[in-house]
Amino acid sequence: MGYDEVYAKWQLNPEKFWMEAAEGIDWFKKPSRAFFEDENTPNWFKDSSVNCCWNAVDRHVEAGNGDRTAILYDSPVTLTKRAISYSELQKKVALLAGGLSSKGVIAGDRVIIYMPMVPEAIEAMLACARLGAIHSVVFGGFASNELATRINDAKPKAIIAGSCGIEGNKVIDYKPLLDGAIEMSVHKPLFCVIHQRDQLKATLIAERDVDWDELKTNSAPVECVPVSGDHPLYILYTSGTTGEPKGVVRPTAGHMVALHWSMSNIFNVKPGDVYWAASDVGWVVGHSYIVYAPLLNGNTTVLFEGKPVGTPDAGTFWRIMEEYKVKTFFTAPTAFRAIKREDPLGKLVSGYDLTHLKALFLAGERADPDTINWASKMLNVPVIDHWWQTETGSPMAANPLGIEQLPIKLGSPSVAMPGWNIQVLDDQGLAVKAGELGAIVVKLPLPPGSATTLWNAPERYTKSYLDTFPGYYETGDSGYIDIDGYIYIMARTDDVINVAGHRLSTGAIEEVLAGHPDIAECAVIGVSDPLKGQLPLGFLCLNTGCNRKHSDIVAEVIGDVRGKIGPVASFKLACVVDRLPKTRSGKILRATMLSIANGKEYKMPATIDDPSILKEISLALSSCGYPIG
Ligand code: COA
Ligand code: AMP
């Protein structure tokens, strides 16, 4: 069956389509049907009883594949390599789950995981899943303040953390960040489990902290706890338009069905194949395609603790592909841009045997044609752009290699996947013609695996995603669909920016800037960057009478953002201006400032209060080096 037939099969009978896909999952109690409508949110396979850890780990051991490698850990930053088989993984996870359970963690409890890219992070996620506890992984590049926000929202019974992360040649001490966050937060976890790394041992707080190894030594393994199909597997916080992150809630059963389906049909991998997603377990790509999807599918997943460049060089990716015979590789375009910048002629590629590699998948940000062309020239395999979001959990649009390789159109993540009825609407909510720009939406109901709600904020879920276009999910992306059904993602319609494949909120950065005592008003935009795609740039208006040196204030706000949001915000650009351009009703003209920064033509907004301000903005931008070139 080709793509058209598979998509039509889903359209004709979604219920049958997903019940068939559900056969790839082991159930304690099979679902009586696929779709259950609960108010606004779809709830798939709700009346089933299931466990995600069983499906990701135990069932492979039970089926006689315990010797197969589950995780290949490769850490050039610690010069460590480890292979963990499915049966070893089962033992480790069952023991850790036993430890958590002995300290009182039960199904439904939340557990925050704040860990670097080590196998123990995957073990921690799976141990929670084994117990039905809801994990919430927090990316290591976030500062205490962000961690505290998540602690207050998720109210975890426990936090599992690493003693340190390693960023290139820097050792990041996690413990002060963790302790600082717990001190700041109103909610306090009952206990913390600390995984001590050799590079930096943390000092434990006697009443609260438990050593990872000791917890396991003193525990007995536990079995998987059956949970209902709609039980939340995890909460993953992602940026919205405000400083308050959105806690995306992932339902267990639908997630497993969708991910399992995607591995054979989109990524074209079979059980036993080596699959590598170079992202971080703190992002959705890490949740779905480092951890759950490859393990659900019985693949070997590569866990890479390093960077595309500098650990030790721009040939690291090729070395790993050769060494582990990687069949399918997934990363963000920015990683390839980083490699291309250091090794434009691809001299380092030629030294490696990449014959096992069959495809490169790119997502997380727009894949620019230059990067796609360079990557296909270097690797000589199909380069597949695919589009999705934290909320969707798996690709909405892709070129489904496992079904059929469709022609590649540069600049497009190809076509809608089964489950996704993707449309483009104008401001009035009317469908636009092929090729016309508009808001990209998905006709409800959303398919299995999509976020069913936001943690503690069901109204925000409705407001953010369902209210603007009744009957549709608003993706927050704008773009168009061509006459062949190829989707083109052009920009965000909200204040979210994409920095090195990381989703950030300009609103959250503005909140930090506004907290500086000398700043009266500010605005942050995402300017184009040749490496990271976008970078946040702040305009600062100072309080009347403030005569401090501008460079001091700029340095302070850069430090504030790093301290309050974290280094991952990559906030290094800010300039002082007298006023911000605004409409007569007081709305800041961010889009106009962005056009100036990106060197794009723009129309003078009819409602602008004072057009002369734009000249000042232009001058301030050029002091930061914009527009580039
Ligand atoms: N813990 C602590 N700090 C972290 C961190 C972590 N897990 N991840 C990133 N940081 C820090 C970095 O050290 C850097 O700090 P610095 O300002 O002191 O240099 C800062 O956060 C910004 O990190 P990053 O955006 O990753 O920039 P970089 O210059 O270190 O690397 C790339 C640039 C392109 C090589 C890198 O972003 C990359 O590999 N991206 C791949 C894309 C990806 O994985 N996307 C995830 C979604 S698919
Ligand atoms: P995140 O939730 O962090 O995965 O970010 C999702 C957002 O990243 C999407 O809404 C898009 O704006 C952007 N994005 C992800 N993949 C792509 C892609 N293939 N092409 C263009 N934009 C993408």
Image (cartoon, helix red, strand yellow):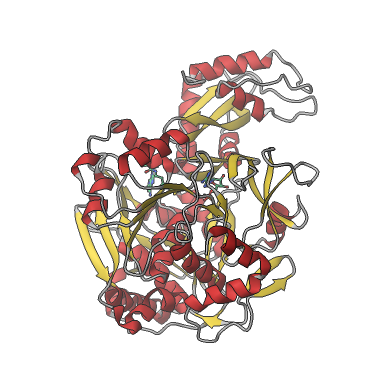
Q: Quadrant of residue 588?
A: top right
Q: Quadrant of residue 33?
A: bottom right
State which quadrant residue 196 falls in: bottom left
**From what the image shows, is residue 204 above or below residue 143?**
below
Vertical arrangement, residue 403 with respect to residue 553, above or below: below
Q: Which residue is nearer to you in this view: 185 or 75? A: 75
Residue closer to the observer: 47 or 511:
47
- Residue 34 at what x, y percent from top left? 63, 76
Percent across and percent down for residue 516 are 56, 33
Relative vertical location of residue 258 with respect to residue 438 in this rendering, above or below: below
Q: How many marks?
A: 0
Whether residue 39 sits left or right of residue 283 in the image: it is right
- Of the pair 38 and 425, the residue shown nearer to us: 425
Residue drawn 57% across the image and 55% down it: 396
* Closer-to-camera residue (386/530): 386
| Residue 601: image location, x then y, percent | 63, 20
| In this rendering, position of residue 271 left or right of residue 494 | left
